[in-house]
Image (cartoon, rainbow, N blue to C red):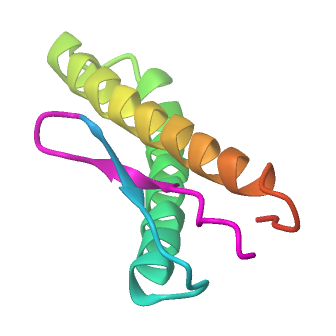
Amino acid sequence: MDTPPTPRLLPWTTPDDKPCYLLTDREGGYVARYAEDVEELQLGMAVGLLEHARELIGDPAVSTRQLRFLSVQLSAALRDAVRVAECRGERASEPGKGV
């Protein structure tokens, strides 16, 4: 008897910030591959933002407004990185699976 598929947490949310899941018995389908691409994009953007943050924080001419904008962007990047970690953690904990 086949075991039912486990819902996969996706790296994005609904417009009202609820989690999205993928339920499929296929591995490597279009949505799964797209989710992996989104995860990589989110992590890459976070790395780039961290590099930009190092530059801004070290610049004494940076305004409060610029630092506030940076903190909003860093917060969003951290939220995305945590969601990617949760997504990958759930997949890694599935029997016979890994990231």
**What x and y, as percent, mark residue 87?**
58, 49
Does residue 74 lie above or below 10 as drawn? above
Q: Residue sitting at 30 percent across and 34 percent down?
A: 73
**What x and y, as percent, mark residue 68?**
23, 17
Does residue 4 lie above or below 90 as drawn? below
| Quarter of the image where one finds residue 72 | top left
| Quarter of the image where one finds residue 94 | bottom right
Main SS of the magenta segment? loop
Please state which of residues 34 and 42 is positioned toward the viewer in this rendering.
34
**What x and y, as percent, mark residue 17?**
21, 34
Residue that sits furthest to the front in the current view: 1
Location of the C terminus by quadrant is bottom right
Location of the N terminus by quadrant is bottom right
Looking at the rendering, the stretch of residues picked out in magenta corresponds to 1-17
Q: Is residue 16 magenta?
A: yes
58 sits left or right of 30 in the view: right
Please state which of residues 24 and 35 is positioned toward the viewer in this rendering.
24
Q: How many marks?
A: 0
Does residue 6 lie above or below 84 as drawn? below
Residue that sits furthest to the left in the current view: 15
Q: Residue sitting at 12 percent across and 34 percent down?
A: 16
Q: Residue sitting at 54 percent across and 35 percent down?
A: 82
Residue that sits furthest to the right in the current view: 96
53 sits left or right of 85 in the view: left
**What x and y, as percent, mark residue 75?**
37, 26
Does residue 90 lie above or below 31 as drawn? above
| Quarter of the image where one finds residue 77 | top left
Please state which of residues 65 and 88 is positioned toward the viewer in this rendering.
88
